[in-house]
Image (cartoon, rainbow, N blue to C red):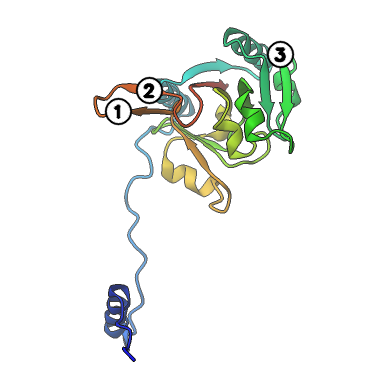
Amino acid sequence: MTTPQPSSRDRILAKVRKALAGSSQQPSEPSRSYLTTHTPDDPEAVLDLLHENLADYRAIVHRSTETALPDLISRILTERGARSVAVPAGLDDSWLAASNVELRPETATLTADALNVTDAVVTGCAVAVAETGTIVLDAGPGQGRRILTLVPDLHICVVRGADQVVASIPQAMPRLDPGRPLTWISGPSATSDIELDRVEGVHGPRTLEVILLV
């Protein structure tokens, strides 16, 4: 009977074990002297940078207060011709209080087929990163299952500026639980063909409207 030959991986690991055998030297912690952000420690500057980078990714960005938020969401839905909205579990009821649309709560009946004929979704987020213009959802309250933000053609995302905006990815990571289903969003869904013709709405919402609460 032929003895199985060790794989390349097994051979490499064997060499590593041999080199470390009998060594009292413990692996040292890697140096982390690099900058964690390139943005001034100024909340207004960080919010402005997020606004700029979101717009650069072709998201439509609004500034609002908590009081004006319901009317703003209603206006966006009306302007976009949305007649139905997916509502994630835990979303603040007041956000859609002024909207004259059909609300479709996140339940077992809100399937992929049902979402395919749903015009929009309104969510919150977990964190937003200014330097990359990225919004991160973690399926927490007010964000819903990932499918809610991938199927409807319009995604309205509310970001609490004071609480949820950070300057950089290194600042965002400690706020996120890697065990949760993270969705990283940088602008509306888009791709380009070999001739660099941009097409939006390929594998997610065609339109992303972000509301920064200030």
Q: How many numbered callouts?
A: 3
The mark nearer the N terminus, 1 or 2, is: 1
Outermost residue, front direction? 1
Q: Spatial distance from mark 3 to mark 1, Cα to Cα?
A: 38 Å
Mark 3 highlights which residue? Answer: 99
Q: Which residue is drawn at 67% across and 22% down?
A: 85
- Quarter residue 55 falls in: top left
Mark 3: which amino acid? Ser
Circles 1 and 2: CB atoms closer than 8 Å: yes
Residue on which disc 1 sits: 193
Residue type beneath disc 1: Asp
Q: Which residue is drawn at 55% across and 27% down?
A: 161
Residue depth check, mark 3 versus mark 1: number of the one nearer the observer: 1
Which three-letter amino acid code belongs to the residue tagged 2? Val
Disc ID at residue 214: none
Q: Residue at x 62, y 34 (%)?
A: 112
Residue wearing tag 2: 199
- SS type, badge 1: loop
Residue 151 locus on image (x, y percent): 56, 30
User: Residue 194: horizontal and vertical position, in percent?
Assistant: 25, 29
Question: Label 1, label 2: how many angstroms apart (C-alpha)?
Answer: 8 Å
Please give the name of the residue rendered at 48% of the width and 22% of the height, measured from the top-left corner: 206
- Label 3 or label 1, whichever comes before in sequence order: 3
CA–CA distance in space, label 2 to label 3: 30 Å
Q: Residue 40: x, y in percent? A: 39, 32
